[in-house]
Image (tube, rainbow, N blue to C red):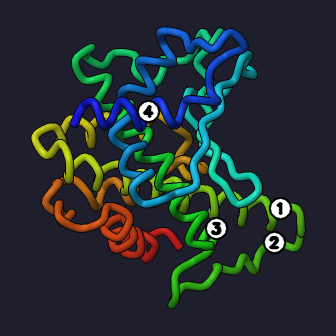
Amino acid sequence: MLKHIFIVLLCFVANAANADGRLTALETRWLKAAAPVLAYSKALKLPIDITVQPRPRPGDVPLAMGFDGGRCKLVLSLRENPDAEAVLKGTPEDDRAMLIEAMAAHEIGHCWRYVQNAWHALPAGFVEPKDEQVDDAALLAARKALRETRREEGFADLVALAWTQRNHPQHYARVHAWFASVRAGGRAGGPHDTRAWIGLAQAGAVFDPLAVPFEEAARLWRAGLQGTE
């Protein structure tokens, strides 16, 4: 099984190395931690490519998902990034691979939404709220963009938690606590304030470990929308 996952990892990173064909030790460690998620996404035939940033921009997060030409681009911004592992600061060393795996599952959640042509779309039965008190079109657009980002982040966080319950149920409480801590440290009401959804997933038992993580996330995501829209 480990050999199979490693082969899958090599397939993903074939075009991700630097000019001399090598990944850094940090990039290799993160990709190995993410390998089970990448293997799962490959089995689902999700169109994912990996891009390694040679020189990340200030503020770049270590893992991010972009989209181009109908494909998902998992971007690693670890090289020459002094804040690459800031998000893991204070976590036990033994937990870090598991948390990186959860972060990878979060990003794959974004890809799944994109492939389903559901990116920034509300599910059936929900409508975009109207702000009757604002006449500024630019402000209205900014508020809508914030809500759209927050929804997608909420969905992706739930995918990460559903993935953890499916594959590492014994560690669910620690992963959930880490997500809750990271989100609590952000701006209240901001684009990454997903606490409404994380709060619905206090116990791993809310997810069916035999179901597809994306479908389990979607079920709880809709419930969370009722309290945020």
> For the residues marked 3 and 1, what is the alpha-carbon distance in whole angstroms?
18 Å
- Judged by depth in the image, the label closer to the viewer, 4 or 2, is 4
Left or right of 65 in this view: 136: right
Q: Quadrant of residue 96?
A: top left
Query: Residue 214 appears at what percent x and percent y?
Result: 38, 64
Query: Residue 111 appears at what percent x and percent y?
Result: 55, 56
Vertical placement of residue 216 versus 192, above or below: below
The residue where tag 2 is placed is 134
Look at the image and tell me whether residue 37 can be seen: yes
Do the numbered discs 1 and 2 sit on residues whose CB atoms are within 8 Å?
Answer: yes
Query: Residue 64 appears at what percent x and percent y?
Result: 59, 38
Q: What's under tag 4, amino acid-wise?
A: Leu
Local SS, label 1: helix
Q: What residue is at 24 percent from the left and 31 percent from the top?
A: 2
Left or right of 13 in this view: 201: left
- Judged by depth in the image, the label closer to the viewer, 2 or 3, is 3
Instruction: Mark 1 or mark 2: name the one nearer the start of the chain.
Output: 2
- Judged by depth in the image, the label closer to the viewer, 3 or 1, is 3
Q: What's under tag 1, amino acid-wise?
A: Leu
The residue where tag 4 is placed is 9
Vertical placement of residue 81 versus 111, above or below: above
- Judged by depth in the image, the label closer to the viewer, 4 or 3, is 4
Instruction: Mark 4 or mark 1: name the one nearer the start of the chain.
Output: 4
Q: What's under tag 3, amino acid-wise?
A: His
Local SS, label 3: loop
The residue where tag 3 is placed is 120
Q: What's under tag 2, amino acid-wise?
A: Val
The residue where tag 1 is placed is 139
Q: What residue is at 46 percent from the left and 72 percent from the top?
A: 225
